[in-house]
Amino acid sequence: MKTKLLAGAAVSALLLAAPAFAQSGPSDQAELVKLLKAQAEEIAALRARLDKIESAPAAAPVARAAAPVSVPQGAQVKRAATANDEAIADSFAPQLAPVGPADQSVAQARAAANANVTTEWRGGLPIFRSADGKFLFKMRGRIINHVSSTFGSNYDARNITTTGARALRIGIEGAVGPHFFYQFENDFADNTSDVGTMFVGWRNDVGKVSYDVRFGNMFNDRSFEGSSGSDAPPFLERNVVATSIIPQRGFYGIALMPRLFWKTGHASVTISGDAVDATQAINDSRTVLGRVHWNPFKTDRSIVHVGLWGFDEALSSRGPGTLTRNTVIGGRFNGNLRVQTGTLVGGTGTTGYGAELGGYVGSLWVMGEAGKRVAHLNAGRPDFESKAWSLSTGFFVTGDLPPYNPRLGTFAQPRVLRPVFDGGPGAIEVLARYENLEYSGIPNATKGEAATIGTNWYLDSIMRLQLNLIHWKTNNRAGSFTGKDSGETISAGFGITF
């Protein structure tokens, strides 16, 4: 093809020169002949070079450095996901959904950095990585809505139907290299804006153990369900051990939290002040909290869990020292249905401790928890004591394994084997729980108990539908609903976590 183009160019040159040649004199004609010969020789040389190139074997394509690609889905993402999943299986059970950047181990962070993708769609939102794998970032969020209806109470004011948002969160998390990580979330439930998780951290490996250190506004590492996020417990509300055997400041506090991990367990220590949204006009309270869990037995389809935890809290001397408790017993969104102490002030500090024992075999899991909290009152008054215990169980009829996290000793998001959106049944779980709570050492001593049956339908690893039927009893001695009372509450919920 190139030779034909050169021949065409030579003919065109002759045709253009012909009129000038016919009109020129003898001397001019000689110059034109000389010029045409030179052009012909040059064209012949070019033709020879082209013929040589065209007759040579095709050259191998030049190798280029593999450039990072941006693929939301497909085979390349699946290959990267497989590499990450292998790292995850090292520290986490294979039935867990992949964790975010701030919850990864060093090995997982390195595996993610080496994946040849800059954008990966996973867990409902994309994860972004820089071309060199050093920077990692993703959005995160949680939408959990409940509806609740109570009937059978002796008080008509308790027999109500309500709705509410358990969580409406949006946040970010990310990492710089395999060691530095961060996370931030804000919650808009109950028509308020509250800072939830907010921390920076550093992680590393030392021989056969690893550690991380976090600083910021953090969720407590306290009790089995108390250490699980609002999207993780199998029931619509955490048990009474998690909600009553707790520091007065609640689930969150500005804290320094070092954690140590080994193959069969973990330990953490938390030193904290008040929550980030607390007043800055008085001294913070001080809380020291520790938890350890151990898996003495573990196979691919079974595990034994043992846990111990405790805390000591010194309340601010300039604060109100309020120890009033109104604890959920029959569903979160019936404000009239609580185990109540009545107004209780003059607190100087609290001390709490508890134990956890459970595990799973195949699709069946069992977990028991118990705890005690002693709240110290001023003016020589006796201590206010809280005692709580819970026993719960669940079974996945679809054959999925319980979403137990052996790295942290908590429940987590499940990896559904056959998601509904891929034509499968999802993961279906049936549940049962009994819980008991008693407040003593105060004039308005009270107690409550509840038995719950329920079911969860996990459509995939980020969406689930929940239904709980609760039979509850209370015996309050303060407030508007005193004396023995009992009834039933039906609660349902829909949750999305990404």
Image: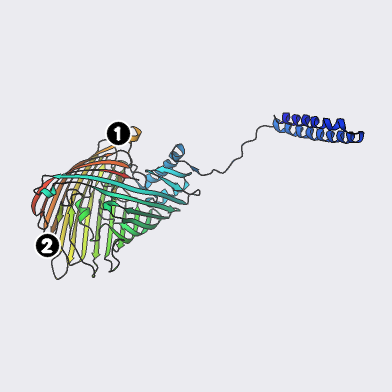
- The N terminus - image quarter: top right
Q: Residue 19's quadrant in the figure?
A: top right
Between 136 and 334, the residue placed more toward the observer is: 334
Q: Secondary structure at mark 1?
A: loop
Q: Which mark, residue 202?
A: none
Above or below, 104 against 459 in this view is: below
Please say if the residues under marks 1 and 2 sit with CB atoms less than 8 Å apart.
no
Is residue 244 shown to the viewer in this render? yes
Q: Please report the residue visible at 59 percent of the width from the left and 40 percent of the height from the top.
A: 63
Q: Residue 278's quadrant in the figure?
A: bottom left
The colouring scheme, among rainbow, by chain, secondary structure or one colour, is: rainbow
Q: Position of residue 259 (x, y in %)?
A: 34, 57
Quick one: label 2, few (<14), some, or many (20+) residues within 10 Å?
some
Q: How many marks?
A: 2
- The residue indicated by pointer 2 is 442
Q: Secondary structure at mark 2?
A: loop
Q: Position of residue 311 (x, y in %)?
A: 25, 61
Q: Position of residue 28 (x, y in %)?
A: 89, 36
Between 359 and 188, the residue placed more toward the observer is: 188
| Amino acid beneath label 2 | Ile
Would you say 21 lies left or right of 189 here? right
- The residue indicated by pointer 1 is 425
Direction right: furthest residue: 26
Q: Position of residue 47 (x, y in %)?
A: 76, 32
Which of the two discs, 1 and 2, labels the residue nearer the N terminus?
Answer: 1
| Amino acid beneath label 1 | Pro
- The C terminus - image quarter: top left
Mark 1 and mark 2: Cα distance apart in space: 51 Å
Between 148 and 182, the residue placed more toward the observer is: 148
Quick one: label 1, few (<14), some, or many (20+) residues within 10 Å?
some
Is residue 418 shown to the viewer in this render? no
Q: Residue 453's quadrant in the figure?
A: top left
